[in-house]
Amino acid sequence: PFNGWMVARLLMPHVRAFAPDLIFSIFLYPDGYAALNIGEVLGVPVVAMSIGSDINSIGDCVSAMHTRTVIREVDFLVAVSDDLCKKAIAMGAPPERTRAVVNGCDLSVFHVRNRLEARQQLHIDPASEAVVYIGRMDVKKGLRELVEAATALYPKRPNLHVYLIGDGPDRSLIENSIQASNATSYIHPLPACSSDAVAVWMAAADLVTLPSYMEGCPNVVLEALACGRPVVATHVGGIPEIMNNECGRLVPPRNSAELAHALASVLDSTWDEAAISAHWSRSWDAVAAELRDIFEMAVSDRQAAAHG
């Protein structure tokens, strides 16, 4: 609850020395709160961005109060999905100063590649049905449900292999769940890897999955689509805004049976990787252009107010 004030106090002399025209802060509290305080002292506009958990899972009532202050008082609020924009507006954000700017990805890294070559690079059997999860090892990402879904599918799909790639606080819980399900031969928890390696894993996959309980606008879904791979994800946050039945399946969270059904449906279907990639290949340059427009508007509005 005190971090926003402390961050502002510590950063103030450094930001003052830099003499910015505008402050842009990603994450509403404590970051955005500190930016708002510094911006008020220096008399410069502040643009804050919400990425998901800063609205979806606020830690305590004081932090919630400060988050609402940021949402109401910044010169412009950006969120990575329309879903987050609606939540922010419900918390007091002025609609006319709130806009969704959906994430992009590095299209020089994430693009359609040859599946067989990627599998050779990763030593994956060309005949296997490869389901890939990439992200935090966190039960809130739906990994218990994914283990349950895989164990339900495996008796009828002996070529199924599920790869869980990432680090996080619940790795031991997930590994215990895999062992308890006698699934160590086909569910493989692996360490986190570089973006270049992530792109190879996506190329090797038959599908990419993200069965999270909550999300903002997950990069892994954007990257998978850019790679031309179908996605099975939960109907939460901004995910429905970037997916349709032409590029995967959406399922309710915390439902391993529906997840298993969707995984089987996607594995049994034929997908047009070029069409999936064309559906959502959004570059960071496009994101940057939208943000720059917002920054210039915030600066000009503040200047107009000062001279008005």
Image (cartoon, grey):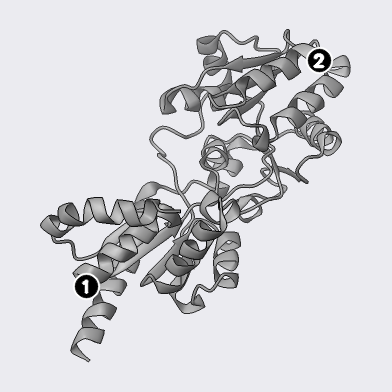
Label 2 element class: loop
Q: Who's the residue at 68% across and 21% down the image?
A: 173
Observer-nearest residue: 34 or 224?
Answer: 34
Observer-nearest residue: 110 or 22?
Answer: 22
What residue type is disc 1 on?
Gly
Measuring from the top left, give residue 144's x and y in whole percent: 74, 28
- In the rendering, which numbered label is found on residue 181? 2
Measuring from the top left, give residue 98's x and y in whole percent: 47, 70
Sequence-wise, the earlier of marks 2 and 1 is: 1
Q: CA distance from mark 2 to mark 1?
A: 59 Å
Q: How many marks?
A: 2
Q: Who's the residue at 79% across and 13% down the image?
A: 180
Locate residue 124 relative to residue 304 in the image: left or right: right
Locate residue 30 relative to residue 235 in the image: left or right: left
Disc 2 vs disc 1: which is toward the camera?
1
Quickly name the residue at label 1. 43
Measuring from the top left, give residue 283's x and y in whole percent: 41, 47
Q: Is residue 207 above or below residue 158?
A: below
Q: Is residue 230 above or below residue 6?
A: above
Residue 100 in view in this figure: no
